[in-house]
Amino acid sequence: MEPRAGALLERLREQAEAYARQAREDALTGLPNRRRFEETLARDLALARRGGRPLCLALLDIDHFKRINDTRSHTVGDQVLREFGRLLASQHRGSDLVARLGGEEFALLMPDIRLDEALAACERLQARVRAHRPWAGLDDLQVSFSLGLVELRPGECTEELYRRADAALYQAKRAGRDRLQLG
């Protein structure tokens, strides 16, 4: 093979890998994106059902994120998203999946864990986020999140699990934000 052809093939391979990564990775935070989350959720749900093992799902929203973008700038908002993503990624077990679903919404998929243990993990995450300073280099910026947490019920499908977690998240928001809500 000609040296130029080998270099071209290598470049094509690298581009294909980059496209595959972009299809499943959030460009801003580097976390898995919604597509990868949904694929993993379907797989983990099937495994949990088949093995009779627990599975918990948490949906999280950064509180008043639009206000951060509107009053501080989108650059600050982007930095908050990156820092929040890093905090989430640093606070979970290796078997968990942390993903950015879009905007200021994140998900934490926790296989092989019961609701009480998942709640304790989410409370630790909340304490870590509350203690984090400075956000985006701004000492006066405070960031909090609301979270809805559910455990898979027998016979429950993906849509039902997700719907319950989403309902719990919105209940946390309606109750004043900066809180965890079981669904």
Image (cartoon, helix red, strand yellow):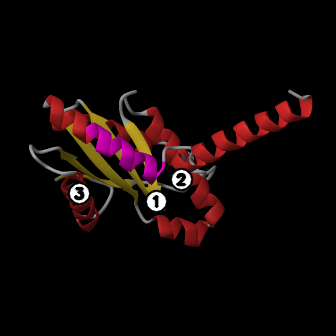
Residue 151 image position (x, y, % from top left): 17, 43
Label 1 Cα neighbours within 10 Å, binned few <14 / some 14-19 / many ≥20: many
Label 3 Cα neighbours within 10 Å, binned few <14 / some 14-19 / many ≥20: few
Q: Which residue is mark 3?
A: 159
For residue 63, above or below residue 154: below
Residue 111 image position (x, y, % from top left): 27, 34
Secondary structure, magenta segment, majority class: helix
Q: Residue at x 32, y 44 (%)?
A: 41
Q: Residue at x 18, y 56 (%)?
A: 160
Residue 147 image position (x, y, % from top left): 30, 53
The dot on residue 104 is 1
* Magenta-colored stretch includes residue 19: no
For residue 104, above or below residue 19: below
Q: Residue at x 63, y 49 (%)?
A: 137
Q: Earlier in the sequence, mark 3 or mark 1?
A: 1
* Side of 39 relative to 16 (left or right): left
**Hey, what amino acid is under mark 3?**
Glu
Cβ–Cβ under 8 Å for marks 2 and 1 = yes
Give the residues drawn in magenta, as a range.
33-44
**Hey, what amino acid is under mark 2?**
Leu
Q: Which residue is mark 2?
A: 81
Q: CA distance from mark 3 to mark 1?
A: 21 Å
Cβ–Cβ under 8 Å for marks 3 and 1 = no
Q: CA distance from mark 2 to mark 1?
A: 7 Å
